[in-house]
Amino acid sequence: MKIGLISAGRMDYSAYLPLMKKIREDGQFSLEILACGTHLSNFHGYTVELIKKDGFVVAYEVESLILGDSPEAISSAMGLTMIKFSQIWQQENYDLIICLGDRYEMFAAVASSVPFNIPIAHLHGGETTLGAIDDKFRHCITQMSQYHFTSTAGHAQKVTSLIGTREGVHNVGAIGLDNLNDLTLLNKPQFFDRYGIDLNQPTILSTFHPETVSADLNIHFVQEMILAMENLDYQIVITMPNADTRGNRIRDILNTFISQNSRVFGIESFGPVGYYSCMKYCAFLLGNTSSGIIEAASFGKYTINLGDRQKGREHGDNVIHCPVLSSEILKAVQRVENAPQLEGRNIYGTGDTADKIMAVLRKMNDKP
């Protein structure tokens, strides 16, 4: 079975990695990576090199990002992505396309394949994020897919409702959790040697992506978050936002804050090992990234989830929802500091998702 796997950036690649390794190790499959989105952007760390460094075949490097982060730039990038991927589908003969999540680049790449009738397997369908336009893209990808690997039973039910049948729907858990079993994480001295950050200090791990539904409020939101951070006695590690609407302006504000504070560190792209190592040793997470909802619980870490970007996504007891107001953020930090220690239970699974997906892929491959 010849599989084309679409990766649009560092975050979906981190999630994909356990599955990619198992597909590569299995002699029944031929795996080719189709890299697009921020993978090919020097501005975002040119993370396609991470894929190559891990020994995977990057068959296509699809450059389709438009300079800028206005609605017009995003829409133009979607159109260019469709055009470039249509040429790939025309000349290749993939038996299956694997895609993940809800990015606009992912939607455009998958949508361009529909006229070619290539079977599509979608990971993380059925989820809800009311503060981002990603909801529309995710549910459209679900409608275009034949195989669905969902992260919870509730999300499987949502997919079933969207497509009108249970056929092809598999509740397997969140693939990113497999990394916690598969990767050898850095200890604190190793982390310091690589990044110059001392995780013996109480540390907040923070990522704030634009709210693409309330795009005009993003500048106010990041300023409120920074105002709260200035009043917290923690070391802060900030990873940079996605290439979403107004994302560059948020990046500029964060970089100014980082440059003016010796206890604040900015990281463009950790990679899976660095990111999960930081998560393991941080005090808690603050921001609006999905990893705070999905992976943090496995480390027994609380997440202060800001605003509406992740609103609607299923979550465990580790998540504290908070408006993007400095006063409310400070109150939420006090709640975390006084909260009981978490047990590490995670509603998104136990880290065996890749094996479950492989079992389905092998059955597909055995069919005449």
Image (cartoon, rainbow, N blue to C red):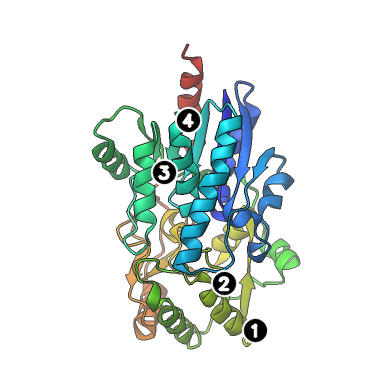
Q: Which of marks 4 and 3 is nearer the N terminus?
A: 4
Q: Which mark is residue 116?
A: 4
Pointer 3 residue: 349
Circle 1 packing at 10 Å, graded few (<14), some (14-19), many (20+), is few
Residue 67 at x, y percent in the picture: 59, 66
Give the answer, above or below, for where 108 lies relative to 302: above
The reply to whether callout 1 and callout 3 are in contact (CB within 8 Å) is no
Q: Earlier in the sequence, mark 3 or mark 2?
A: 2
Residue 170 at x, y percent in the picture: 37, 33
Give the answer, above or below, for where 121 lies relative to 315: above
Q: Earlier in the sequence, mark 2 or mark 1?
A: 2
The reply to whether callout 4 and callout 3 are in contact (CB within 8 Å) is no
Nearest to the eye among marks 4 and 3: give it.
4
Nearest to the eye among marks 2 and 4: give it.
4
* Residue at the top extreme of this rendering: 368
Q: Mark yes or no: residue 352 visible.
A: no
Q: Distance between the residues labelled 1 and 3?
A: 39 Å
Report whether 88 appears left or right of 127: right
Looking at the rendered structure, the secondary structure element under dot 3 is loop
Residue 17 at x, y percent in the picture: 59, 43
Q: How far apart are marks 3 and 2 (CA)?
A: 27 Å
Pointer 1 residue: 259
Which amino acid does the dot numbered 3 rest on? Answer: Gly
Identify the residue shown where x is 47% and y is 11%.
368
* Residue at the right extreme of this rendering: 193
Which amino acid does the dot numbered 4 rest on? Answer: Phe
Q: Residue 238 carries which label?
A: 2
Identify the residue shown where x is 39% and y is 56%.
134
Looking at the rendered structure, the secondary structure element under dot 2 is strand
Circle 2 packing at 10 Å, graded few (<14), some (14-19), many (20+), is many
The reply to whether callout 1 and callout 4 are in contact (CB within 8 Å) is no
